[in-house]
Image: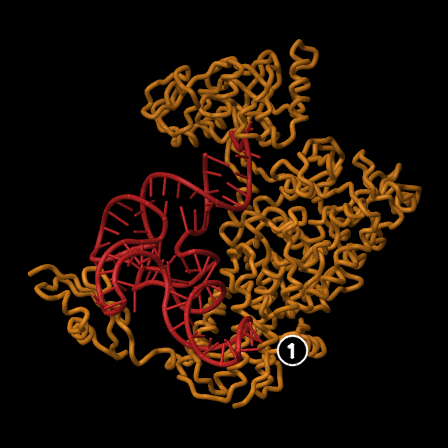
Amino acid sequence: MQKIKNYAHSKVEKKWRADWSKKKLYKTDLKSKKPKYYNLVMFPYPSGDKLHIGHWYSYAPADSWGRYMTMKGFNVFQPIGFDSFGLPAENYAIKTGIHPAKTTKTNIKYMRKQLGDMGAGWDWDAEVVTCEPDYYRWTQWIFIKMYEKGLVYKKTAPVNWCPGCKTVLANEQAQDGTCERCDSPVTKKDLSQWFFAIKKYAEELLNYDGLDWPEKTRLMQEYWIGKSYGVDINFKLENSEETLVAYTTRPDTLYSVTFIVIAPEHPIVDKLVKGTKYEQEVKHVAEEVKKQNLIERASEGGKNKIGAFTGKYAINPATGEKIPVYIANFVLMYGTGIVMADAHDQRDFEFARKYKIPLKFVISKDGKPTDPKDASEAFIDDGILFNSGEFSGINNKEALPKMASWLEKNGNGKKTVNYKLRDWLISRQRYWGAPIPVVYCDKCGEVPVPEKDLPVLLPTDVDFKPSGDGKSPLNTSKKFINTTCPKCKSPARRETETMDTFVCSSWYFLRYPSGNLKDKPFDTKMLDKWLPVDMYIGGPEHACMHLLYARFIHKALHDLGYVESKEPFKRLVHQGMITKDGAKMSKSKGNVVSPDEFVKQYGSDVFRMYLMFMGPFTQGGDWNDKGIMGIKRFVDRFWKLINEKDGKESPNLIHKAIKKVTEEMDKMHFNTAISTIMELINGASEGASKETKKMAAQLIAPLAPHLAEECWMTLGEKESVFLSEWPKYDPALVVDDKITIAIQVNGKLRGTIEVPNSAEKEFVIKTAKEAENIKKYLVGMTTIKEIYVPGKLISLVVKPS
RNA sequence: GCCCAGGUGGUGGAAUUGGUAGACACGCAGGACUUAAAAUCCUGUUCCAGCAAUGGAGUGCGGGUUCGAUUCCCGCCUUGGGCACCA
């Protein structure tokens, strides 16, 4: 008996990686005429944690997908890079004194090795690193182009302030009222800030035509953009020329409105109370609200509502009544920052009860008048209007558009659309980012740096410890700050703030196919060919940040004429989250699992297949290494089968496997693709023919690239398995001659029979009725119904005769 | 509170235009090989009763539709994710 050498994963994997790299197997010819396929993963941040299991969980299947598409005949482009600006490196520097550039460089070096050990088909020639001047020069260039297009502006605004990181946060980074990075409660602070006018694209961003995205992600973005249709209603102020404009989506409740509430930070508040006896109380409340962090202001559906009377009254345009005007914390600077308040809104209702403001109902279930004094909460259901002038007696939903038109006709209102989306705050009072390319001159004011002077290099001689006043560490570099005005050449100062790293990651996928051009950001011809990205794989946590920003920047660049496509990512797939003992892996929890040891012990193929075998790719799961031996055994058995003497198995076996694996791969069901190959191996217990072995190697190639290549070459091939064409099955060989039919009597399974594939209904039913197990159930019975599902089962319905 | 996705053996999971529930793998039990162990191979493994043949129950819970429901409908429970005073 021949002795088969054990599969030496470490030697084999090293050998093929060296070979692939030498032959530049994964360098994509971007000019090739073959159909293109841009296969992209969200690039990693080079953190001190290095590449962890989560990265593997998404990158390995992404690579398998790319390899599969390659074998299906596509010219696959699969680049990788590093999203290397950002807070963690800077925070680490503050703690240890090691310069962020140095830590980042070290981490990138290590992660390059890890990404290499993965054996994935990255095109390293296209690599981008966002913290390198060659890259951020063009991030700055995009800022300038956006500036010229009027999509960038600066304004003083109350911004989210993290007292822990001593920096400003975007809304998206303070979503739950705590800092994304350090979990400190977020407060508000007035600062002059740079914004990208993403709101101008709100409507366009709601268009998902032609995109194959998860419904869930789309809904999350739609909710984030938050479009609503409503009416701006004019409330004249008593004894004044002033009008308060309130935005509402419920004009049908107008007759119920008994007070007006203004957001405390609304500029009109000062004017209303100035010099009155109410001024002190109103200002006091406004200050209190400002001090509240986002959690307090939004806590528990708003139990702690606070407010103050302004001393003013407005006129309800429908009833002509005089109604009091308040400020309160539950009204935000959204819409007009002023709301009409009534008994058909739970928040208004609670506030009115607390501040003893009269309420009245105008809607009830049946249209019979009801009184709020008997109610413990607002009536928010739909119903019939009463005490509502000409609208009484009709359904409030029907009345809504009519009242909106009525208000417009009488000059008391205007139909409007509002979005919850706010402009994107992009400036950061931080060191480790791309400097905002703007110069301030006493004569010329704010001057964008001319294109030819880019990049504005990030200086190295700075003290990056936070000053505590919210100023950027760049202020400590005299060399950096002092410059000359690009327009008038007189002494000038540089902007010292840097850009949000999300700006850097909003366009990296355009840089990859542009071949790292020195004098241009993009190779427009290549972008026209390669965009949009055909498959984008990454975590769902980016739904309302990266994925929204990237769409926005892409659309802006489209409108500027740089890219032809209107959307960056045609198809989007989120991998599931991988947890450890039910918790998200994080350094602070100390539950981060490193892939390196597993890769060393079992090999990259086994490790990646184990991750894919855990369950559906989009589902994720809790990490444990219990079953990894099962995959190792499978690899060993696969290797053994390939090396055994050629045998002869049923030809159906491999063709059925090809059919099933192809179907599973198409659906990205890697777990069942693997189990199908396992079944193939288990089924070939008597060995397999050479042809079958070759096809088996091809089937496993996307999932276990090193193993497949080794097997492929062992079987006598000379060229890489990844240059071979994905096997096709013979339809004639996937059907069996004999099929098993299940027999049910009165809905219960009572047995099975084997019949020829070609058997007719009558024959199958006759055979079934005569079957040993079935006969006894039919004694003394009359068959009242016979159902035959071809190739599957027979269902007999009987009753006593 | 609102929106979305789930709940299947001891474990990860498979199977849905309604058609034999538990593929594949882990674990466990027994056996072979071995002085022994590891590794490997073979057999069994949803639960209950039975030596077995076989019978009964069974896909979160309670109803319904159907010859037939993990799959469809109604009402709950529960886990995870997202949003949350946006008027």
Residue highlighted by disc 1: A12
Residue at (67, 71) in percent of width and height: A30
Residue A99 vs residue A259, the one in the foreground: A99
The quadrant where residue A185 appears: top right
Among all residues in the image, which is located at the extreme top? Answer: A277
- The letter of the red chain is B
Query: Residue A434, percent across and down?
Result: 78, 50
Counting from the top left corner in percent of width and height, residue A361 is at 41, 19
**Marked residue chain, label 1:** A
Could you say which is closer to the camera, residue B48 or residue A270? Answer: B48
Q: Residue at x 54, y 47 (%)?
A: A206
Q: Amino acid at mark 1?
A: Val
Residue A271: x and y in percent read: 68, 18
| Left or right for A388, reference A491 | left
Q: Quadrant of residue A784?
A: bottom left
Q: Residues within 10 Å of mark 1 (few under 14, many from 20)?
A: some
Picture quarter containing residue A155? Answer: top right
What is the display colour for chain A? orange
Can residue A772 be seen here? The reply is yes
Residue A158 place in picture, x, y as percent: 70, 32
